[in-house]
Image: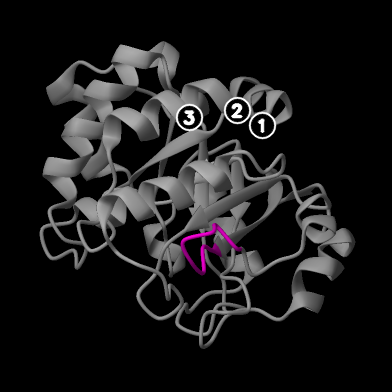
Amino acid sequence: MHLAADTHTHTIASGHAYSTLADMARAAAEKGLKAIAITDHGPAMPDGAYLFHFMNSRVWPETLCGVRLIKGAEVNILDGDGTLDLPEELLELLELNIASTHPPTYTGSTEAADITRAVLRVMETPHIHVIGHPDDSRFPVDFSELCRGAADTGTLLEVNNNSLRPDGFRENARGNCLEMLAQCEKYGAMVTVSSDAHIDGDVGNFVYAQEILKETGFPERLVANTSLDKLLNALQQK
């Protein structure tokens, strides 16, 4: 399955990543990608980007190294109410916002019912386009409810290559991803495939994600980033 865009990447603005905006765009061009979303961590992450980083993304060129730059953020879901660490007026300025749960920033109950409720609330936010790595058993969800909610709200669910690495740190990511894909197909929820790259060499690395899509025979019509137009359409519809 051809993938035209990488929808989750980090630059040195996320303190635990290692490459610049230009590095990431150059790597995307070398991989033949049409677009790359730069989605640095929100400010609740201990080394996340400050608010001004996202506000000033207006100075970015539309393309760099011939690659369309999609301005975005990976915001943190902070609690069981679905509180986020970037304000709505700032999310509105960005094109692709991922909402994710992370151990350093989430303070609510980790019971599946509570995590599911929080994520469903986040999906109702107009400018949250993607739920990031919903594959981690440290933050369990009801995949039937998750995928039905994603289909109802036009929110994309992420197939995260970094999660699926053999040395990945997210718990039971492969098993959870298999269940998620089955429920996505059942409800017609769309996914986006990403590298979650924290260094330029990982941009466009979808090898483990591609394997699981092939294994499951997941339909291409439900993968948002098989073309740039299809991806931008999905984001605009949300």
Task: Tell me the number on the disc at residue 150.
Answer: 3
Q: State which quarter of the image contains the N terminus.
A: top left
Question: Quick one: which residue is furthest to the right in this view?
Answer: 59
Q: Give the residue displayed 25% in from the left and 56% down from the top.
A: 136
Task: Give the amino acid at mark 3.
Answer: Ala
Instruction: Give the distance between the C-alpha atoms of the residues marked 2 and 3, in whole angstroms.
Output: 15 Å
Dot in front, 1 or 3: 3
Q: Main secondary structure of the magenta part?
A: loop
Front residue of 62 and 131: 131
**Is residue 219 visible in the rendered structure shown here?**
no
Task: Give the amino acid at mark 2.
Answer: Leu
| Vertical arrangement, residue 227 with respect to residue 21, above or below | above
Residue 148, quarter of the rendered image: top left
Instruction: Please report whichever mark, 2 or 3, sits nearer to the chain's N-terminal start.
Output: 3
Residue 136 is inside the magenta segment = no
**Is residue 93 visible in the rendered structure shown here?**
yes
Residue 89, quarter of the rendered image: bottom right
Task: Tell me the number on the disc at residue 231.
Answer: 2
Q: Which residue is mark 1?
A: 235
User: Which span is picked out in magenta?
Assistant: 76-83
Q: Give the residue displayed 62% in from the left and 25% down from the top.
A: 234
Q: Position of residue 10 (x, y in %)?
A: 53, 66
Dot in front, 2 or 1: 1
Front residue of 195 and 106: 106
Instruction: Give the distance between the C-alpha atoms of the residues marked 1 and 3, in whole angstroms.
Output: 13 Å
